[in-house]
Image: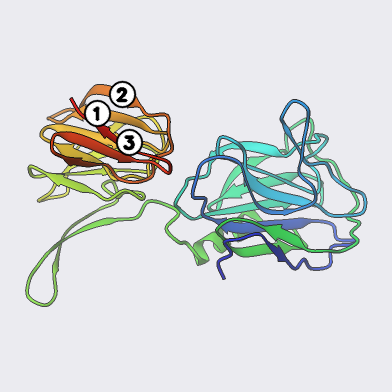
Amino acid sequence: MILAVLLQVAVPPLDGIEALSVGVWVRPLRRGEHHFLWRGEVQTAPSGDRLFKPREDLVTFLLGTDERGFFMGAVHGNGRMPFPFVTLNEVPTHAWSRLVAVKDVRGFQHFYMNGALAWSDVEAAAGGVIRPFKDAGGPARTHGEVDDVLILPRALTAEEVRADYERDRRGSTPGTSIALRPEGKSPAPLWESKVLSSGTATPTIHAGRIYTISSAGIVVCGDVATGAVVWKHRIPGAYSASPLIAGDRFYAVNEAGLTTVLKLGAEPAVLAENALEDVILASPAVAAGALYFRSDKALYAIGR
């Protein structure tokens, strides 16, 4: 069942166990700090840093993201540190990701994202702290669009984490774009391409070319007849809005309101970057010589 509000989740008996694995499927709709699954109190230090201290009477855990959208978590304490650990793995918006954290019998933590190891403190000086699992009982909490909560009183192996992910993959990795040729009642496949797959944005076709943009800002141009890749180019930011083409100009606005303008051709050329400094998830439109952008707060018209 998909949970999209703040809810309590039952926790199995944890008193006296020796290891713990927690996991959850998440689909964040915006970049920034999220607490998807947690048990215990997340505090804020005077410096603004998040604190998540272990407790002697409760087994605590946290799976979330920091203010930049990077995978953040802790299981029964983050080694000798009072704050949750932040990995270098960015959790994409508008896509499902499987987050898993394991505290093994030696007191080491292992963080997994989509079945792959993101980080482990086995070789960290602050890692490997063994704390008794003493637990007075009580629920965990979830927030946001989450599903399939895992709270298991043992340490999953890397192979088990991978198998757990493979059993329920749900579009967290780029899919496949398929071009179809309408023929009678059953359209015939023309080509398939994983490189030309998009995230949330819809592909755009112009002058015999297909253009896609991933959630991470990878623009790919391909031949619409064959699916062959013509070029790839990265532009800054994370993207939910579909791109717009007017003439030989390609417009893409990222979630932070920065619009990148590319001149199309055999190779792309960046013509301009314009910042509206507003959150924009909706796709732009063009009419009567103006470009229109809609944020959560305003409608912008950009003319000559």
Q: Residue at x 85, y 45 (%)?
A: 54
Residue beneath label 3, please?
253
Q: Residue furthest bottom?
A: 185
Q: Residues within 10 Å of mark 3 (few under 14, many from 20)?
A: many
Tally of marks: 3
At label 3, the amino acid type is: Val
Q: Residue at x 24, y 23 (%)?
A: 270
| Image-based side of 58 in relation to 292, left or right | right
- Across and down, in percent, residue 43 comes to 78, 40
* Alpha carbons under labels 2 and 1: distance apart: 6 Å
- Quarter of the rendering containing residue 223: top left
- Across and down, in percent, residue 252 comes to 28, 36
Q: Earlier in the sequence, mark 1 or mark 3?
A: 3
- Across and down, in percent, residue 190 comes to 13, 60
Which part of the image, by quadrant, shows the N terminus?
bottom right
Q: Residue at x 19, y 40 (%)?
A: 286
Q: Is residue 288 visible?
A: yes
Which one is in front, 293 or 136? 293
Q: Residues within 10 Å of mark 2 (few under 14, many from 20)?
A: some
Mark number for residue 273?
Answer: 2
Badge 2 marks a residue whose secondary structure is strand
Q: Residue at x 38, y 33 (%)?
A: 257
Q: Residues within 10 Å of mark 1 (few under 14, many from 20)?
A: many
| Image-based side of 33 in relation to 199, left or right | right
Q: Earlier in the sequence, mark 2 or mark 1?
A: 1
Mark number for residue 176?
Answer: none
Q: Are marks 2 and 1 in contact (CB under 8 Å)?
A: yes
At label 2, the amino acid type is: Glu
Mark number for residue 261?
Answer: 1
Badge 1 marks a residue whose secondary structure is strand
